[in-house]
Amino acid sequence: MVLGAVAGLLEGLRRSVRDVDRAVTDVWTAGKRLAQNTQSAHILQTTRTRTAQLRQELERHASPERG
């Protein structure tokens, strides 16, 4: 009888640990995706800034006032 109770408790613990492990894996995966998206957003902002600078430089060279 005691052995059955202990086995039941251990099985409950095993299932709980498995569920926690799955949840932690899901959170970890979501965190990695968020980090990747954050990096992409930063790179896009840098690209936008550099494109604007390039456009200004091209307009400067294309203007008839150049000399």
Image: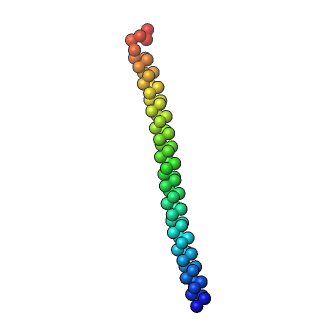
Return the x and y of residue 39 as percentages of the image width and height: 51, 43
Left or right: 15, with 59 as reference point: right
Question: What residue lies at 45% left-to-right and 25% top-to-bottom?
Answer: 54
Q: Nearer the viewer, residue 7 or 59?
A: 7
**Quadrant housing the N terminus:** bottom right
Q: Is residue 46 above or below residue 24?
A: above
Question: What residue lies at 53% left-to-right and 62% top-to-bottom?
Answer: 24
Return the x and y of residue 62 as percentages of the image width and height: 40, 17
Q: Is residue 7 above or below residue 28?
A: below
Q: Is residue 32 above or below residue 42?
A: below
Question: What residue lies at 50% left-to-right and 44% top-to-bottom?
Answer: 38
Question: What residue lies at 55% left-to-right and 75% top-to-bottom?
Answer: 14
Q: Nearer the viewer, residue 55 or 41?
A: 41
Q: Is residue 23 above or below residue 6?
A: above
Image-quadrant location for residue 5? bottom right
Return the x and y of residue 34 as percentages of the image width and height: 49, 50
**Quadrant housing the C terminus:** top left
Image-quadrant location for residue 3? bottom right
Give the total number of marks visible in the rendering: 0
